[in-house]
């Protein structure tokens, strides 16, 4: 188990988000964390990525306390695509992706052939090579998110955390980004993502963590744990769970309030 | 493993690595170079040097450029040597150093606040330095006490703004800008009040200082400023890489291993000291700290902080402005701050016209 948290108490200033939360990220998994707004899923991800200091409890990376490792050393093993990233005016895709090499560089050694190779392969993997000299602020949402992903990939970390990577994207760009994540997972990386769409989570995740009110309600293979009971417990939504016609993974069909009326009209 | 999706079609991991930026390596040293930045930096340095030589050469008594060169190396007529080395060279060197300090300070704060208006002119540091300077002038301070007063004023003002804008253990850029603008307005009011309380002579002397001037600057002004730069430029060089990461947001910077809070603290300290030292030396020369980093960024076509180019742009701006201020309405001698203020105002209007944001 490379990444895990134990007995975590998480809070922003005085607002308690979770207490005594423990989580283990299976190696080589594509773990997806789901849950209603403000359930603490992004907070948990931030704590695992050492963005947020837990009030109590510990996060371990490769058997060591994450806080005991130099932060640049952590950055060579664990990457994060944060939710709140800023695009500086006029930055090009190549410049952005190149900045992902920071943890591999030093003041005296600012650019090496390894850096160039990592940037080139990260841009190829995310299909942004043709956009290399374009300005990030001129790109579409999907292209922009691929550029950010390329930056995280250039960091060359075996573990990659993604905080709501599909938010603000339309459906085709959501699929594009998630397919890319699936490719990265298949190449052997461990991925942890916070997602909003349950059906997408079930499709892509090999390990699902369902949270509510700062605690983990269920975790495991989505095929085994996603049931109407779980969805109702986590999201307070009554639903049917049917096999996804494309993948056979669980698909959630929420119960319709207007069903009776629609039936009446069309029958 | 039944839940593993296989929806992807293409495998995009192929190495079609055509993209490779130019870089310069020498043993264990290697830096990534943008050709345009190298060109711009070289051109700025050359232009500053030429402007400096011209500024030393022309005046009430013109010294031919050849004589300027020989005078600098100490083999010339006593008159030329007096004019060059005692009168004009210290003024020009002070201008270059002060301009570089303002340029660097502006670049640092615009990068930290991720806002072009986050320059020390706007966020109150210069006004704080001015308050300290005016107080020293009113109490009849010596030149050194005025310099010390403005340095103290700048630091005190920076600490106050930092404390007021800190929230939950961190300083957010836009808060720093807003708190700074408020503080600046208060201090400008205080400065005006202080001027009304002073007698005519003090008031005139303080007002002259307030516009920012290089008149009568000697090696006693130039050398401390150069020493400050000698200490702070290496610090800025070390900070520039983590600062570039912080332009992508604090989380992005932390994710790649930047220790955000210490870097921000050190950068603020360096920026305040640069701005304070420059104001102490030449008074608050307006708009250099605002305009130099923006001009440098556009000239180099790069994103975010460009420290070397900003410093050189600042140096060039002040040198040219001082030359123009002395020669344009000759024999009327304007303080350099009037010229940078006029240029900066025009530049800001141009920016606002161009970028509708």
Image: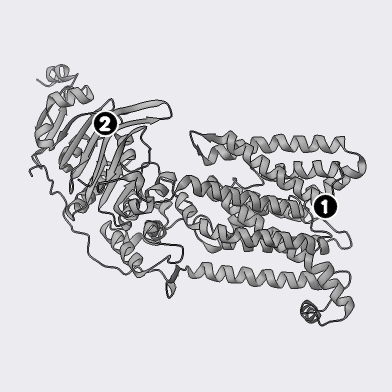
Residue denoted by label 2: A21
Q: Residue at x 69, y 71 (%)?
A: B49
Secondary structure beneath disc 1? helix
Say which of B3 and A261 sits in front.
Answer: B3
Whether residue B320 is visible to the viewer of this picture, yes or no, is: no
Report the number of discs: 2
The residue positioned 46% from the left and 49% from the top of the image is: B246
Could you say where residue A169 lies in the image, as x and y percent from the top left? 31, 42
Query: In the image, residue B93 lies at what x, y percent?
Result: 74, 65
Q: Position of residue A39 (x, y in %)?
A: 29, 28
State which quadrant residue B41 falls in: bottom right
Chain designation of label 1? B
Which of the pair A107/B211 is nearer the observer?
A: A107
Q: Quadrant of the C terminus of chain B?
A: top right
Q: Residue at x 54, y 63 (%)?
A: B300
Q: Which residue is mark 1?
A: B143
Q: CA distance from mark 1 to mark 2?
A: 62 Å
Above or below, B16 relative to B200: below
Mark number, residue A148: none
């Amino acid at each position: 188990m490379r990444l895990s948290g134990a007995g975590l108490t998480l809070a922003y200033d005085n607002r308690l988000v979770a207490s005594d939360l423990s989580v283990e990220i299976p190696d080589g998994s594509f773990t997806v964390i789901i849950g209603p707004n403000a359930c603490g899923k992004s907070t948990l991800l931030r704590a695992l990525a050492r963005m947020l200091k837990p009030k109590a409890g510990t996060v371990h990376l490769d058997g060591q306390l994450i806080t005991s490792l130099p932060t640049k050393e952590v950055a060579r093993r664990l990457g994060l695509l944060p939710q709140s990233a800023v695009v500086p005016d006029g930055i090009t895709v190549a410049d952005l992706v190149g900045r992902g090499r920071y943890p591999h560089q030093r003041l005296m050694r600012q650019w090496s052939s390894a850096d160039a190779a990592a940037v080139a392969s990260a841009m190829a993997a995310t299909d942004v090579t043709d956009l290399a000299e374009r300005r990030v602020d001129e790109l579409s949402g999907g292209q922009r998110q691929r550029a950010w992903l390329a930056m995280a990939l250039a960091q060359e970390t075996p573990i990659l955390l993604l905080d709501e990577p599909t938010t603000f994207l339309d459906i085709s760009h959501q699929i594009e980004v998630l397919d890319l994540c699936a490719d990265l997972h298949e190449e052997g990386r461990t991925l942890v993502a916070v997602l909003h769409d349950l059906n997408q989570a079930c499709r892509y995740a090999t390990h699902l963590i369902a949270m509510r009110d700062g605690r983990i309600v269920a975790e495991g293979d989505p095929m085994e744990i996603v049931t109407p009971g779980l969805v109702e417990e986590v999201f307070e939504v009554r639903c049917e769970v049917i096999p996804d016609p494309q993948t056979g993974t669980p698909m959630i069909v929420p119960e319709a309030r207007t069903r009776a009326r629609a039936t009446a009209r069309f029958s | 493993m039944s839940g593993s999706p296989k929806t992807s079609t293409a495998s995009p991991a192929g190495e079609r690595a055509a993209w490779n930026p130019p870089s310069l390596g020498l043993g264990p040293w290697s830096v990534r170079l943008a050709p345009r930045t190298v060109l711009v930096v070289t051109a700025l340095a050359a232009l500053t040097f030429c402007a400096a030589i011209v500024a030393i050469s022309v005046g009430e008594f013109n010294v031919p450029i050849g004589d300027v060169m020989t005078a600098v190396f100490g083999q010339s007529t006593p008159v030329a040597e007096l004019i060059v080395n005692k009168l004009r060279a210290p003024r020009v060197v002070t201008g270059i150093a002060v301009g570089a300090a303002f340029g660097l300070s502006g670049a640092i704060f615009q990068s930290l606040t991720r806002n072009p208006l986050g320059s020390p002119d706007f966020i109150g540091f210069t006004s704080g330095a001015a308050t300290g300077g005016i107080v020293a002038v009113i109490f009849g301070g010596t030149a050194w006490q005025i310099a010390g007063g403005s340095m103290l004023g700048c630091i005190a003002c920076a600490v106050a703004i930092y404390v007021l804008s800190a929230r939950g253990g961190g300083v957010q850029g836009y808060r720093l800008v807003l708190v700074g603008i408020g503080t600046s307005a208060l201090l400008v009011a205080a400065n005006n009040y202080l001027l009304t309380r002073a007698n005519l002579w003090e008031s005139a002397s303080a007002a002259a200082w307030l516009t920012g001037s290089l008149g009568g600057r000697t090696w006693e002004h130039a050398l401390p400023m150069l020493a400050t730069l000698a200490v702070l430029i290496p610090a800025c060089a070390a900070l520039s890489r983590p600062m570039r990461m912080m332009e992508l947001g604090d989380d992005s910077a932390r994710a790649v291993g930047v220790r955000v809070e210490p870097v921000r603290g050190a950068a603020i300290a360096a920026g305040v000291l640069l701005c304070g030292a420059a104001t102490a030396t030449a008074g608050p020369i307006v708009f250099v700290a605002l305009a130099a980093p923006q001009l440098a960024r556009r000239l180099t076509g790069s994103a975010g902080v460009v420290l070397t180019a900003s410093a050189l742009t600042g140096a060039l701006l002040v040198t040219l402005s001082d030359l123009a201020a002395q020669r344009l309405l000759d024999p009327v001698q304007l303080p350099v701050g009037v010229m940078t203020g006029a240029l900066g105002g025009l530049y800001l209007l141009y920016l606002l016209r161009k970028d509708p944001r």
